[in-house]
Image (cartoon, rainbow, N blue to C red):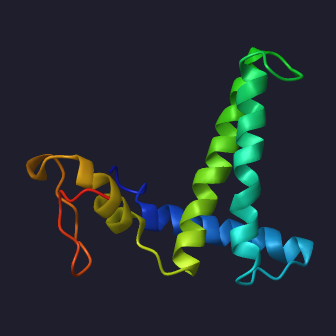
Amino acid sequence: MPEGRSLDRLSDRSQAVGDICAARAGIDCDAVRHPARPSGEPGALQAAFLKLNGQGRATGDADDRRRALTDETADLVAQLPLFARRQDIDPPDAIARIWGRALPKAAYAPPSLPPGVTEGATP
């Protein structure tokens, strides 16, 4: 991944922005708030996608709708690393463990697998 775009850096930046927004709104971002935030994002992403594809009440022009889809995607992607960090989840390891099962061993080398998990095993 290009310099400055790693998952940890994304999570750090998302945390900093989240802290600023929470302070401005007087919100305590506790263990309950973190799962609540990303749970609303898929709906907003779906609405933007439907509008872009003529399936919802369109607002703005095509460029505005495309920008809305891009922005909602960014919101969702930015929230998930924060949730994972708060829950002590390592997304690259989890992805390798789950998705790596479907690939030949040589095609996907996960960073590490939990004890007892065999690469290439079916779920």
Q: Quadrant of residue 111?
A: bottom left
Does residue 19 appear in the picture of this structure? no
Answer left or right for 88 relative to 39: left
Q: Residue at x 44, y 61 (%)?
A: 7
Specify the farthest residue to the left: 106
How many numbered discs? 0
| Residue 106, percent from left and from top | 8, 49
Q: Residue at x 69, y 33 (%)?
A: 69
Q: Residue at x 77, y 15 (%)?
A: 54
Answer left or right for 26 relative to 74: right
Does residue 13 appear in the picture of this structure? yes
Q: Residue at x 44, y 68 (%)?
A: 8
| Residue 123, percent from left and from top | 32, 59
Q: Nearer the viewer, residue 99 or 34?
A: 99
Q: Nearer the viewer, residue 68 or 83?
A: 83
Q: Nearer the viewer, residue 54 or 20?
A: 54
Answer left or right for 104 relative to 49: left
| Residue 85, percent from left and from top | 53, 76
Specify the farthest residue to the front: 122
Q: Quadrant of residue 93?
A: bottom left
| Residue 41, percent from left and from top | 72, 51
